[in-house]
Image (tube, grey):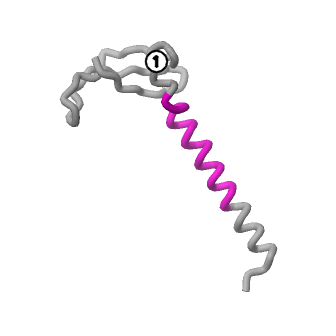
Amino acid sequence: MIAVGELVVFVALLVLIIVGAAVGWERYRGGGAGSRGAGVSGAQPTAEIFIDPETGRRMRVWFDARTGQRDYRPE
């Protein structure tokens, strides 16, 4: 049988893992859909252009030096 103290430690660790994952996900993902709009983020266009294999559209790479986030936008 599990002691109450062990259960408390297990639940506390589980909560810490979930909160850590949520915070880490937002940090590395870049803040959600609002950051993708033109001029909203600090992103600048780069010279990198490629054809998206799924859509066949020309895409340009945008880079935000402040966050390190790369964004792919249609030309």
Residue 43 location, x and y as percent? 46, 18
**Residue with the mark numbered 1:** 43
The C terminus sits in image quarter: top left
Q: Nearer the viewer, residue 33 or 58?
A: 33
Q: How many marks?
A: 1
Amino acid type shown at disc 1: Ala
Left or right: residue 34 compared with residue 1? left
Q: Quadrant of residue 47?
A: top left
Residue drawn at (46%, 20%) of the image: 37
Which residue of the protein is positioned furthest toward the right in this rendering?
5
Residue 1 location, x and y as percent? 73, 86
Give the vertical position of 4 relative to 67 (above or below): below
Residue drawn at (43%, 21%) of the image: 63
Which residue of the protein is positioned furthest toward the bottom in this rendering?
1
Q: Nearer the viewer, residue 32 or 29?
A: 32
- The secondary structure that most of the magenta stretch takes on is helix
Residue 28 is covered by the magenta coloring: yes
Secondary structure state at the residue bearing disc 1: loop
Q: Tell me the magenta residue range.
A: 14-33
Q: Quadrant of residue 4?
A: bottom right
